[in-house]
């Protein structure tokens, strides 16, 4: 009898074409997603006269540079050039493209699952670090660099060293106002941005099983912010219910066969992990970043760290972060004044995220300006059908088109220098949302609470009578 296997081992073995003498594996790629930033890779294969090996398995999406306003006539020539280059590369290589006028356009990591392109058991690559999002479906999903993107385009394979395995188990139930974003920021704050370095993280436990697919995608999306190569969750009935009926999902008798296969992807009982972490869901509170790294995060009710609260090796980074953010050690996180808010991104731009924010905003007015950018055109249409857009606009926030928007600041959506933004995005590094911008990461509901009060606020106080 063979030893019990983790899900990582099962998926890795299923995709391994060969292994070099140094232990690096050549893996078959089932889905390759490209965007405007992939132009370097297309140029590389063109220089060598190579075609795209499997054009039916590569999908192009306009998202990073996608304007959220004025799409019919793009004023910025650089943005227009980047989008045109993707169009040209898609046309030259016979690729399906989700262009700006496509009713299914959106952020690549929102579109893939929506379309049913992301299925359990597959290997998904994209030249974007947050490709880990797709691991929520029980896939091997990780970002790759330009050279690797070119290799996948030319061969439909990628060289990769198998990471170590790590399981983060979250037992118990989450409290009101606590979300997958809080689980992620919580474990990253606890373990650090290198806490899962060199590992593939598998999430397990009652709290994880209780998450929707939107929540699971948020959690896997943020895995890399804790140093993980990627995150993953074993597929279950929640997964199957989300996938069923989607455009590229199996149909008819193939559906039942697929579900039977997918159930076998879960790790075996007794499978050993290189590292285990256990968290108590009831101890997790709404969490907000205070610094310039995802690990610099605290429960909203906490005070900012004093020098003595921080390990010596991280003391200087903490001091520099507080200075950049215009904050002082010892002051309460709650009550910090914000200048604007943003709801969107591949982390938190799905319909569930917008519903959570709307629940807080309904019947209330925002005290600061802000923007809501749905993760895809389909999410936008669904939100409008549910009347969520009217809640946002009645509150005083801008309702704009889908794309990466203010998360990356490549498309004209920026936070001005020195301004403080409550954001549902994934990174708070210096300059991420604009030169000199000060970003606080949190859940969409927490962003909505900040909009209503004009300060970092515990959303639980605003949900009383609404949950």
Image: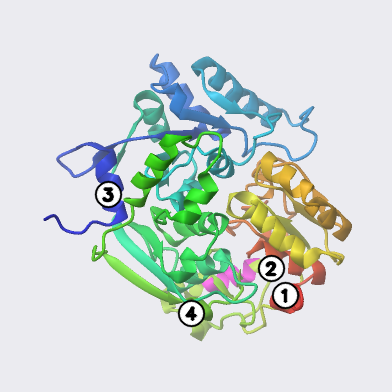
Q: In which quarter of the image is residue 380?
A: top right
Q: Is residue 189 above or below residue 130?
A: below
CA gap, disc 4 to disc 1? Answer: 24 Å
- Mark 4, Cα crowd under 10 Å, few <14 / some 14-19 / many 20+, is some
Q: Pointer 4 and pointer 1: residues touching (CB < 8 Å)?
A: no
Q: What is the span of residues highlighted in magenta in the rendered image?
A: 318-324
Q: Position of residue 246 (x, y in %)?
A: 55, 39
Question: For the residue labelled by badge 1, is the local secondary structure a helix, a strand or a loop?
Answer: loop
Q: Is residue 254 magenta?
A: no
Q: Pointer 1 and pointer 2: residues touching (CB < 8 Å)?
A: yes
Q: Is residue 321 magenta?
A: yes
Q: Which of marks 4 and 1 is nearer the N terminus?
A: 4
The residue singled out by tag 4 in the image is: 310
Classify the position of the C terminus by image quarter: bottom right
Q: Residue 446 carries which label?
A: 2
Question: For the residue labelled by badge 2, is the local secondary structure a helix, a strand or a loop?
Answer: helix
Determine the residue positioned at 76% across, 32% down.
Answer: 71
Q: In which quarter of the image is residue 303?
A: bottom right
- Left/right placement of residue 269 relative to residue 242 reads left
Q: Earlier in the sequence, mark 3 or mark 1?
A: 3
Q: Which of marks 1 and 2 is nearer the N terminus?
A: 2
The residue singled out by tag 3 in the image is: 10
Determine the residue positioned at 46% across, 53% down.
Answer: 136
Q: Which mark is residue 457?
A: 1
Q: Is residue 84 above or below residue 284?
A: above
- Left/right placement of residue 259 relative to residue 113 reads left
Question: For the residue labelled by badge 3, is the local secondary structure a helix, a strand or a loop?
Answer: helix
Q: Earlier in the sequence, mark 3 or mark 4?
A: 3
Q: In this view, does 157 lie above or below 285?
A: above
CA gap, disc 3 to disc 4? Answer: 40 Å
Q: Is residue 41 visible?
A: yes
């Amino acid at each position: 009898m063979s030893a019990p296997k983790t899900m990582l081992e099962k998926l890795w073995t299923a995709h391994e074409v060969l292994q070099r003498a140094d232990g690096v594996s050549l893996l078959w790629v089932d889905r390759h997603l490209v965007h405007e930033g992939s132009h370097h890779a297309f140029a590389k294969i063109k220089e060598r006269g190579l075609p795209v090996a499997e054009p039916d398995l590569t999908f192009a999406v306009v998202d990073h540079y996608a304007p959220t306003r004025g799409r019919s006539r793009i004023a910025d020539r650089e943005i227009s050039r980047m989008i045109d280059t993707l169009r040209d590369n898609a046309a030259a290589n016979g690729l399906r493209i989700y262009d700006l006028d496509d009713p299914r356009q959106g952020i690549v990591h929102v579109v893939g699952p929506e379309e049913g392109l992301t299925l359990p058991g597959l290997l998904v690559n994209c030249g974007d670090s947050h490709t880990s999002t797709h691991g929520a479906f029980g896939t091997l999903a990780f970002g790759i660099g330009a050279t690797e993107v070119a290799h996948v385009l030319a061969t439909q394979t990628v060289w990769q060293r198998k990471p170590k395995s790590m399981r983060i188990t979250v037992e118990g139930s989450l409290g009101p106002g606590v979300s997958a974003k809080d689980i992620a920021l919580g474990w990253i704050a606890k373990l650090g941005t290198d806490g899962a370095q060199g590992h593939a993280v598998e999430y397990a436990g009652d709290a994880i099983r209780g998450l929707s697919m939107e929540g699971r995608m948020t959690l896997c999306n943020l895995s890399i912010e804790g140093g993980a190569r990627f995150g993953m969750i074993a597929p279950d009935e929640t997964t199957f219910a989300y996938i069923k009926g989607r455009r590229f999902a199996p149909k008819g008798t193939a559906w039942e066969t697929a579900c039977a296969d997918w159930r076998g992807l879960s790790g075996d009982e007794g499978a050993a992990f290189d590292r285990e972490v256990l968290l108590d869901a009831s101890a997790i509170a709404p969490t907000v970043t205070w610094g310039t790294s995802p690990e610099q995060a605290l429960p909203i009710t906490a005070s900012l760290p004093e020098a003595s609260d921080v390990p010596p090796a991280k003391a200087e980074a903490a001091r520099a972060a507080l200075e950049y953010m215009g904050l002082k050690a010892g002051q309460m996180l709650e009550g910090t004044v914000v200048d604007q808010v943003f709801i969107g991104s591949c982390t938190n731009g799905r319909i569930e995220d917008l519903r959570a924010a709307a629940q807080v905003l309904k019947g209330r007015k925002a005290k600061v300006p802000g923007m809501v950018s749905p993760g895809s055109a389909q999410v936008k249409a669904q939100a409008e059908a549910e009347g969520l857009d009217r809640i946002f606009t009645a509150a005083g926030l801008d309702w704009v088109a889908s794309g990466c928007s203010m998360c990356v600041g490549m498309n004209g959506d920026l936070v001005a220098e020195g301004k403080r933004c409550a954001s549902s995005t994934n990174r708070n590094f210096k300059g991420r949302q604009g030169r000199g911008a000060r970003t606080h990461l949190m859940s969409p509901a927490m962003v909505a609470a900040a909009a209503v009060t004009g300060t970092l606020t515990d959303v639980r106080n605003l949900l009383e009578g609404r949950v």
